[in-house]
Image: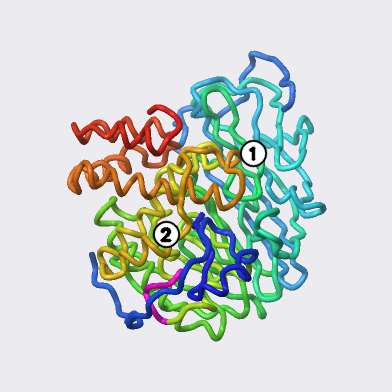
Amino acid sequence: MQNKTATTFKFLSLFLLSFLVSCSSFAPAATPTAAPTITKIPVPTLTPIPTNTPLPTPTNIPAPERAKYTLDTTIDYDAHTVAVNESIQYPNRTGNQLNALVLAVEPNLWDGSFTLTQISIDGTPITTYTLAGQRLDIALSSFVKAESVMNINIQYTLALPFAEQEDPNVARPRIYGYTKRQLNLVNWYPFIVPYINGEWVLHEPWYYGEHLVYDSADYEVNLKFTDPATAPIVASSGVAEAQADSTRYTITAARAFALAASRDFQVSSIQVGDVTVSSYYFPLSKIAGRAAMQASADALQIYSQRYGAYSHKTLSLVMGDFNDGMEYSAFFYLSRDFYNLYKETPGSYLIFVAAHETSHQWWFEQIGNDQAQQPWVDESLSTYSEVVYYENYHPELLGWWWSYRIDYYKPEGFADIPIYDGQGFRPYTNAAYFQGAHFLSDLRARIGDEAFFAFLQDYVVQGQNKIVTANDFFRILKTHTQTDYADLVRQYFRNVY
């Protein structure tokens, strides 16, 4: 998630603070520069039932590398309801026998939003489950051996809540749900949470930051609307393919499938090599929508060179009709306020937030991490990626960026704090995002560009489709430099790595 608040005028900062919840805030106005030219870029907890009898599984069929989610989905856009028949092909890659599963069911955090109809495993309906808050515990009737495959079917309906925005200092921004002109499905389907070191990882929500941890999985979403004649425009993770009475969206090795729908969307697209970058925005925001698209396309190009190849064929950036921005697989939101305050200069929140969110397609999507316990692992890299963007496309604004974006807030504290220890939105942001960015800047200056970017490229390779930790970060870093940086670790981190 981006450090995101936006304004180009200092006197607006206090007024807008309650509307912009990403991990940034307000600062002095930027110095206007020439508007960017839009051009095409050349190609560059239950008690399980103990038993030793494994569930029947197909023979002579190797377990797939990842889970696959198939979501047959029907949306009534005007009634704000969704009917889903979800199938999960889950390979037991935990290395252990399993006699229970834990799924995250985020829609159940809203009263009346999630109605479960049926669960079956390998074709047999089951009742040995409990659903409390965001957690669905399923007790299996027998052990499932390592490397065997389970087929889980879940049928349910969603009654979407109105995404009313509240004070970001006391409540998380509302994305899941609908507004007067937009419907947003994020974390909208039950998914099996990661199993790490013998435990299912599902943290409690917090009023800032992210608490979910995702395994990589493959997705197929077959989407149709109850009234095709008035169907909205859809932005989504994945590639769209028209079917006889629906649209199929597919994406592989993805963390989370998201979609947004609106009858008011306007769309602009640009090609970066074989990747289609599409910007979805509301009327009157065409200039800002195309500028955000260009910034994202530029960022995708330079990050592909600096970090490694982008992993999907599409990237959708969506103007969110709410006070937040957020990253998902091949998809991210930018707050409406970023667009409304855009003054046609690259020195603006809209532009550096677009660059930040684009970088999450590496630091979140390709390399996963525990966003609740170690948020700096992705957020500091995404914040520092804004530097990589500006030094390549607007080097004259680098000094402004450090002053306006980071140092105006006088960041302090240790970068490696969990979201729960942030002591408030601003102290958390200053530490995990801004102090983390300072660490990476100092580290790069210390070890040099060659070692720094060789490390990041290796980090991407070794962390591809995995969930990494801070220890992995420093383990890989140590193989790329003989330079002593221990003092920097002591300065910016409370833990020893």
Q: Which residue is mark 1?
A: 152
Asked if residue 463 is positioned above or below residue 93 in the image, the reply reads below
Residue 245 in view (yes/no): no
Q: Give the camera-side residue of 382 and 180.
A: 382
Query: Where's residue 105, x and y in %?
Result: 68, 45
Q: Residue at x 32, y 30 (%)?
A: 475
Asked which quadrant contains residue 212, the reply is top right
Q: Residue at x 61, y 37 (%)?
A: 151
Q: Is residue 21 magenta?
A: no
Asked if residue 483 is positioned above or below residue 338 in the image, the reply reads above
Q: Residue at x 54, y 86 (%)?
A: 284
Secondary structure at numbered mark 1: strand
Query: Where's residue 405, x and y in %?
Result: 43, 62
| Outermost residue toward the right in this view | 112
Q: Is residue 345 magenta?
A: yes
| Outermost residue toward the bottom in this view | 284
- Magenta-drawn segment: 344-349
Q: Which residue is mark 2?
A: 356
